Image (cartoon, grey):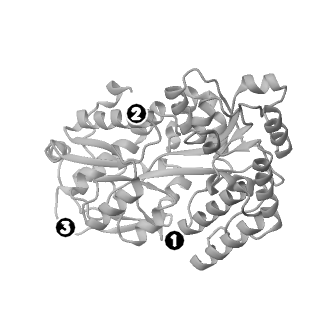
Amino acid sequence: MRRNKLVVLVLAFALIAAACDGGGGATTTTAGVTTTAAPATTTTAAETTTTAAATLEGVELKLWGWSSSDAENTALSDLVAAFNEATGAKAEFQPQSDYDTTLNTALAGGDPPDVFYVDSFRLADLAEAGQLAPVPEGVIDDPDDIYPSLREAFTYNGTWYCPPKDFSTLALVYDPAALDAAGVAVPTSWDELTAAAEALTTDTQAGLAMGVEYPRWAVFLFQAGANLTNADVTEITLDSPEATAALQYVADRYADDTFVRPSDVDAGWAGEAYGQGKAAMTIEGNWIVGYLKDSFPDRQFAVAELPAGPDGKGTFAFTVCYGVPANAANPDASWALVNYLTNAEGALAWTNAFNVMPARVSVADDWLSSHPELEAFVTGADYAHRWGFKPGFGDVTGVFNEQANAIVDGDATVTDLIGETVAAGEDVI
């Protein structure tokens, strides 16, 4: 962690300046996104800096999130520690093992953390429930520098709720030596993926390990020209020949044992299965890079774009933001931490320390120059689909996941999956 670079006096946040004077706020709308302006201020820069220091000195802040690995916990904790050194605050990252349940309990009980992760999939639910504070005007440095699609991912009914911490896409992670030994090239099409998975499958190694869940299987829908819903999530579109062909392709790979679930090889997730050498390929996001380097430093890997399907390329873009609760105990301090973590300097420091991609355009080239081997993840952003639907849609993807696992177990068919998922989706819509 480049702490010397980060320990700077970033105390003159516009947030704190706005908080130094009374008066009513105003609401503005730009490009369809509404933000709530903080009250006007007449303080000088020197007064603002003094007020900021006084406001943050000794303030305790809890940042909650989930944990994908020790590497992620360490990287984010280091960045939070740099914020503390720069401001005098006492913020702490507290990863939660059962994140959704713990967060829901805290929100319902009126004692939420000061800042918390919000997956784009859950934004609509939290916003609809009135549990998130909108981004106040002027508290986030240069919001136009954030990729528009990522800012839109955290906009609900025209209101922007939180800036993204990073983003990830899915790509094909593979063992170059295993492909060379099997005499196969990196697959670029479904047919080539089938052939590669067959050639790489042995008594001790699966061709490909992948979670049996919508966020992984759906990329094949995209590649076939299908989707679960239409663009504005007003119609379920899964019952189509294209979707049937895509899902059957995936089901067939599990049936012939060239694709496996991580649990089938005694692994907790696909990254672990790959790291342990139990799979020669996997479909995962760029979070796997830090995990492999930390947990399996001797395991070689390379990354390629996902193989194209009948309709071309397709992948998912996943993103998480730092949200502030609507009833935050100290909203000024909460937003100060959020800004520190998501401004250009913080975004670059975080994504250099843990291999996700920065959500800001201004640092993309800098990041890629340090991560040239991960270019496939960045390229995928050009055709990635947003991860998110509308309130209540978690039940729909839950039905999809149940049916997908039943298919792999031999207890359901693709027709069953489509029928059950369509019924659940129509109930929500």
- In the rendered view, would you say 61 is above or below 276? below
Q: CA distance from mark 3 to mark 1?
A: 38 Å
Q: The N terminus is located in which quarter?
A: top left
Q: The C terminus is located in which quarter?
A: bottom right
- In the rendered view, would you say 190 is above or below 181? below
- In the rendered view, would you say 314 is above or below 39? above
- Residue drawn at point x = 66 percent, y = 57 percent: 405
Q: Are marks 3 and 1 in contact (CB under 8 Å)?
A: no
Q: For the residues carrying marks 3 and 1, which lies nearer the camera in this image?
A: 1
Quick one: label 2 or label 1, which is nearer the N terminus?
2
Q: Which residue is mark 1?
A: 392
Residue 324 lies in quadrant: bottom left
- Choose between 106 and 256: the one closer to the eye: 256
Q: CA distance from mark 2 to mark 3?
A: 39 Å
Q: How crowded is the residue under tag 2: few (<14 C-alpha within 10 Å), some, or many (20+)?
A: some
Q: How crowded is the residue under tag 1: few (<14 C-alpha within 10 Å), some, or many (20+)?
A: some
In the rendering, at what x and y percent does residue 169 appear? 61, 45
In the rendering, at what x and y percent does residue 122 appear? 47, 62
Q: Which residue is mark 2?
A: 75
In the rendering, at what x and y percent does residue 276 appear? 60, 30
- Residue drawn at point x = 76 percent, y = 58 percent: 247
- Residue drawn at point x = 78 percent, y = 57 percent: 246
